Image (cartoon, helix red, strand yellow):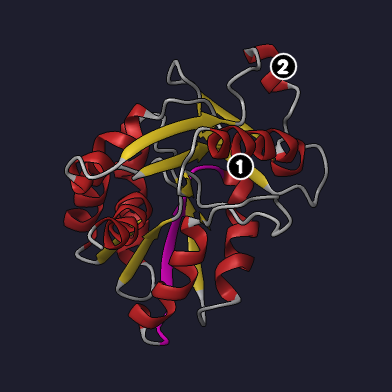
Amino acid sequence: MKIGAITVGQSPRVDVTADILPLWQGKAELLEAGALDALTYEEILELGPERADDHVLVSRLRDGREVTFAERRILPHLQGCIDRLEAQGVSLIVFFCTGEFPANFRHKVPILYPSDVLLRLVPVLCGGSPIAVLTPSQLQLEQIRVKWERHVPRAAVFYASPYGDPAALDRVCARLREAEGDLVVLDCIGYTQAMKRRIAAATGKQVILARTLLARVVDELLDT
């Protein structure tokens, strides 16, 4: 089975596939496309958020650098990724991003968004209790709080980039530990299994990792 993967940054996302591909055990061929693949670093910097209502995305470039940009400014590039992957014969497309995207992309094959999976599963798992959420950037705090409080009673949102200083992740663990509720949601595809284990050990809480949750949902299809 050919599966297409779209990153809002640049492909290949070797940091993501390092955790995902072992779960599929060779049952799928993964083809990747990135919204920023054809852009220079200088062109990418011009896509930064400018308006108060901009939906902010954070992603990783091919060389490992972190970039921040407005979702609205990359939507045409994302449509191009869908078109290219479908032309290569994929049966399913997954997004390597937990952002919320408009529903008006043109596509012939199903598209699986990690955010849709998270927003349906987490309210069940938290059982009506508050949750803690980790996101990459301070610029995302309010948009992530609004996103989650449409689905759970309360969401305490904190930030630490998965692409930056590892010490920042360790520092935020103390705040996650003191937050209400017993569930921490890592709301970015960039967080790794190793980061999940560190956060779980430091907080004593259950931790939901977007990338492996996505991979396990797809694995249900691979076993049919």
Callout 1 amino acid:
Leu
Seen at 51% across and 60% down, the residue is 115
What distance separates the C-alpha of mark 2 from that of mark 1? 16 Å
Residue at image position (81%, 37%) is 50
Give the quadrant of the C terminus.
Answer: bottom left
Q: Quadrant of the N terminus?
A: top left
In the image, residue 202 lies at what x, y percent? 20, 54
Residue 130 in magenta stretch: yes
The one of 65 and 221 positioned closer to us in this rendering: 221
Neighbours of disc 1 within 10 Å: few (<14), some (14-19), many (20+): many
Residue 167 in view: no
Q: Secondary structure under badge 2? A: helix
Which of the marked residues, 2 or 1, is nearer the chain's N terminus? 2
Closer-to-camera residue (207/94): 94
Residue linked to disc 2: 43
Looking at the image, can residue 98 be seen? yes
Label for residue 92? none
Span of residues in magenta: 128-137
Q: Which mark is residue 57?
A: 1
**Which residue appears at 44% of the width and 65% of the height?**
118
Q: Which residue ends up furthest to the bottom in the rendered image?
A: 128
**Relative to the observer, which residue lies in front, 22 or 98?**
22
Instruction: Decide: is 78 above or below 63.
Output: below
Examine the image and state in which quarter residue 220 appears.
bottom left
In the figure, is residue 199 to the left or right of 146? left
- Specify whether residue 116 is painted magenta: no
Q: Nearer the viewer, residue 44 or 102?
A: 102
- Mark 2, residues whose alpha carbon is within 10 Å: few (<14), some, or many (≥20)? few
Residue 102 appears left or right of 214: right
